[in-house]
Image (spheres, rainbow, N blue to C red):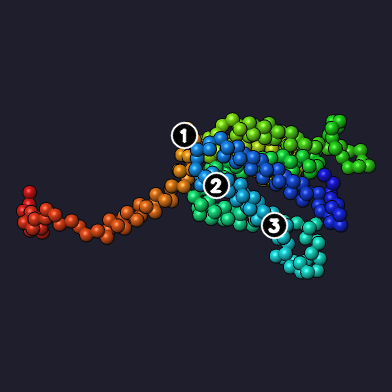
């Protein structure tokens, strides 16, 4: 992917184009899994299928929130760019702080929508694992990343120079291929895999391991823990993947959706029953002043 992509009179950063293509691939694969999931069990009511089908839209909206917060974050510190040089917004990007702000806003949006529609977090996270793995794969395959110096024949370098470096991005993309194949084969074979947390667990564990292996060939400044920030992130993914429990269920999607949608309804019904019970007067049938009153004989 070149550093600058020319589309007519418009010039875009190559990394930005790669990021957009990666998001499109991740969203398409999530849509594909949801479509397969909905076509297997047609006996499930349309309301349940609609609740699951809208989850990929929520993930897309969350990704757009993070993306636009990252791209337009510079307006918070330099609002004059909007009327002085608006085309510069296409070439500049925000810092890591804007990414963190976008992630927080996306999390607030997801939490609100999940509670509003009674969705299951496990289904949402399993779908996010599919989209994120494919997006990282394509982004790593399209954006070159120079690693440590090497004499191997597949080393990459800057044009006009003799030095060669490990293609860190290619290593990561190749290592992620088995994960993508497993995700697609597993979701096509099993109708109850979504919502168990297994997709998220395996994706975090394998993705963390693949990133850790590829990081040994990448340039990076070690932190106080003798690991680079990327290695710390991969280690965290490994730990979460190893300790994440798997929800086992055998009754299929109906039970999973009922569990996720009936939690809030059950609480509301219980509160209503308690209020009605408190409003009802105590029954006086069979009440005896001598035996049940305050002056009843002691036993």
Q: Position of residue 266 (x, y in %)?
A: 39, 49
The answer to whether residue 149 is above or below residue 113 is above
Secondary structure beneath label 1: loop
Task: Say left or right for 21 vs 32.
Answer: right
Identify the residue shown where x is 60% and y is 41%.
Answer: 34
On the image, which quarter does residue 64 sit in? Answer: bottom right
Looking at the rendered image, the quarter that the N terminus falls into is: top right
Mark toward the start of the polypeptide (1 vs 2): 2
C-alpha separation, residue under disc 1 versus residue under disc 2: 19 Å
Question: Is residue 208 among the parts visible in the rendering?
Answer: no
Q: Position of residue 162 (x, y in %)?
A: 92, 38
Residue 77: assigned label: none
Task: Say left or right for 266 vs 217.
Answer: left
- What residue did someone put label 2 on? 50
Q: Position of residue 293 (x, y in %)?
A: 10, 58
Identify the residue shown where x is 84% and y is 35%.
Answer: 155
Of residue 277 and residue 104, the one placed in the foreground of this image is 277
- What residue did someone put label 3 on? 68
C-alpha separation, residue under disc 1 versus residue under disc 3: 41 Å
On the image, which quarter does residue 259 sit in? Answer: top left
User: Which numbered disc, 2 or 3, marks the residue closer to the eye?
Assistant: 2
Question: Is residue 57 among the parts visible in the rendering?
Answer: yes
- What residue did someone put label 1 on? 251
């Amino acid at each position: 992917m070149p550093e600058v992509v020319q589309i007519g009179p418009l010039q875009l950063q190559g990394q930005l184009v790669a990021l957009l293509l990666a998001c499109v691939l991740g969203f398409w694969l999530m849509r594909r899994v949801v479509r397969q999931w909905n076509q297997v069990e047609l006996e499930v009511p349309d309301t349940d299928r609609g609740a699951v089908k809208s989850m990929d839209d929520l993930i897309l909206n969350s990704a757009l929130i993070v993306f636009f917060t990252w791209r337009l974050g510079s307006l918070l510190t330099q609002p004059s760019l909007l009327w002085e040089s608006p085309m510069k917004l296409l070439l500049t990007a925000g810092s890591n702080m804007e990414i963190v702000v976008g992630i927080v806003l996306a999390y607030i949006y997801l939490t609100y929508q999940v509670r509003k529609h009674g969705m299951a977090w496990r289904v949402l996270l399993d779908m996010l694992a599919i989209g994120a793995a494919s997006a990282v794969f394509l982004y790593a395959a399209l954006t070159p990343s120079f690693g440590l110096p090497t004499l191997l024949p597949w080393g990459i370098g800057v044009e006009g120079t003799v030095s060669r470096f490990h293609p860190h991005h290619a290593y990561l993309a190749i290592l992620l291929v088995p994960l993508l194949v497993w995700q697609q084969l597993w979701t096509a074979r099993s109708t109850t895999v979504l919502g168990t947390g297994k997709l998220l667990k395996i994706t975090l564990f394998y993705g963390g391991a693949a990133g850790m292996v590829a990081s040994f060939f990448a340039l990076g400044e070690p932190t106080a823990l003798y690991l680079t920030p990327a290695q710390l992130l991969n280690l965290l993914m490994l730990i979460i993947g190893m300790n994440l429990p798997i929800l086992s269920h055998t009754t299929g999607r109906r039970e999973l959706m009922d569990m996720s949608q009936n939690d809030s309804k059950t609480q509301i019904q219980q509160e209503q029953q308690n209020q009605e019970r408190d409003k009802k007067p105590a029954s006086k049938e069979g009440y005896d002043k001598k035996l049940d009153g305050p002056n009843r004989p002691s036993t």
